[in-house]
Amino acid sequence: MSNLAIHGGEPVRKEPYPAWPVHDERDIEAVTAVIRSGRWGGYPYPGPQTAEFARRFAEMQGGGYAVPMANGTVTMEVALRAVGIGWGDEVIVPAYTFQATAAAPMAAGAIPVIVDIDPETYCMDPKAVEAAITPKTRAIIPVHLGAQMSDMDALMDIAERHNLIVIEDCAHAHGAKWRGRGAGTIGHFGSFSLQSSKILSTGEGGVLLCRTPELATRVASIIDCGRPHDEAEQMFTMGANFRMAEIQAALGNVAVERFPEQTRQRDEMAAYMDEALSDIPGVRVLKRNPRHTTRAVYRYIFAIDPAVFGAEHGPVCAALTAEGIPCWEGYEAMHHYELFQPHLSKLPVPSAFPERFQFEQMDLPEAERACEHEAVWLDESVFRAGPQGVDDAVAAIRKIQEHAAELR
């Protein structure tokens, strides 16, 4: 019989990892109080729970002006609209991210310009960003991905020299810090998802951190159907209903209370994982920049060299899952991504600028290598199971490497 669980062997871990999201009586009491209040939705905006969540979230991240809203995709679209970025403008996005990062500029009328990643971190490569800038470039959306952060020093330098807006995509980065500054507070905006799998969740929802109160006021107007949110001028704008509901905000207020301890635990166990993986043949731990002072671990990504490890990442992930370790191959490169097919959207941008969406002509070798051969994503639950949770994951990876020939 094979040693690997995928072929009938004994799995390394039989006990399930901790479930997510975490909940207890505090969540039930918070939601019950909202239901009893009769004020369930988001109008008038913001409700008391939403206003309190905005305050707590900004405090948690260490700055900015928080505007909670419907999800972590419209956050990016609204940020672009708030600074007047739209028809025909160019917005630089990385090739390795969820499709929403590239879809949001299209929703605002802008063209997503896809650039390659740094192979050491899998985040946006600043050199590729610099090379992609044209007279039409208006914004950069760096993505903090898989327990890593983009090089915000380099990107902010580029943005300042070229007068560009920076919208940090922080869907993976709640609680992360760069030089002690919270993710989402370094650029002009920080976009956060609160979707059910995220490490701070309200089921569905998002938060946009804004650099100034003026930007936050305009953002609040856009997501509240254009109603004025500036006390002095009472200016209307064109908006839509992207408000957060009070029930979601109530869950967020409880989640913020738990969050510091969860972040500490995940960060500590991720450092333990870095060390434990370092001597397995064919495994490469992504490089953590010393300026990245606190990690957020939504997904932990490491790379394998198939030639040395003995198998491609797809079979490795299947084998890890069979060993009881929750994992995934990760996103597809944006120009090959099944969830990103602009021609199916019927949005005006791909119809008006078809030459900008000729994906077969794009050359993004680092993203392709990561997405098609190297990347292994471990679930955050591995890092809430203490040292034993990490030890089991490492033992399973080592076991699969030693028996990789069985996966061919």
Image (tube, grey):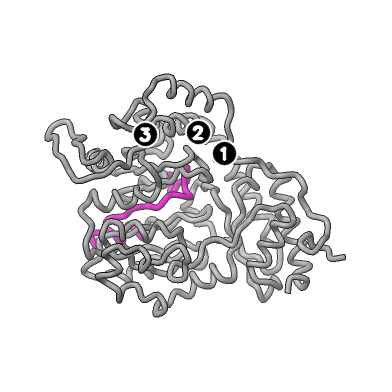
Indicate whether residue 349 is drawn in magenta.
Answer: no
Q: Residue at x 40, y 43 (%)?
A: 206
Q: Return the residue nearer the eye: 213 or 7.
A: 7
Mark 3 to mark 1 CA distance (whole Å): 20 Å
Tell me which label, 2 or 1, sits earlier in the chain: 1
- Please name the amino acid that badge 2 sits on: Ala
Q: How many marks?
A: 3
Q: Return the residue nearer the eye: 312 or 356.
A: 356
Query: Horizontal placement of 333 versus 281: left or right?
Result: left
- Please name the amino acid that badge 1 sits on: Pro
- Please name the amino acid that badge 3 sits on: Ala
Q: Which quadrant holds the N terminus?
A: bottom right
Tell me which label, 3 or 2, sits earlier in the chain: 3
Mark 2 to mark 1 CA distance (whole Å): 9 Å
Point out which mark residue 255 bears. Answer: 2
Mark 3 to mark 2 CA distance (whole Å): 13 Å
Residue tagged by mark 1?
21
Q: State the image quarter where residue 15 is shown.
A: top right
Point out which mark residue 54 bears. Answer: 3
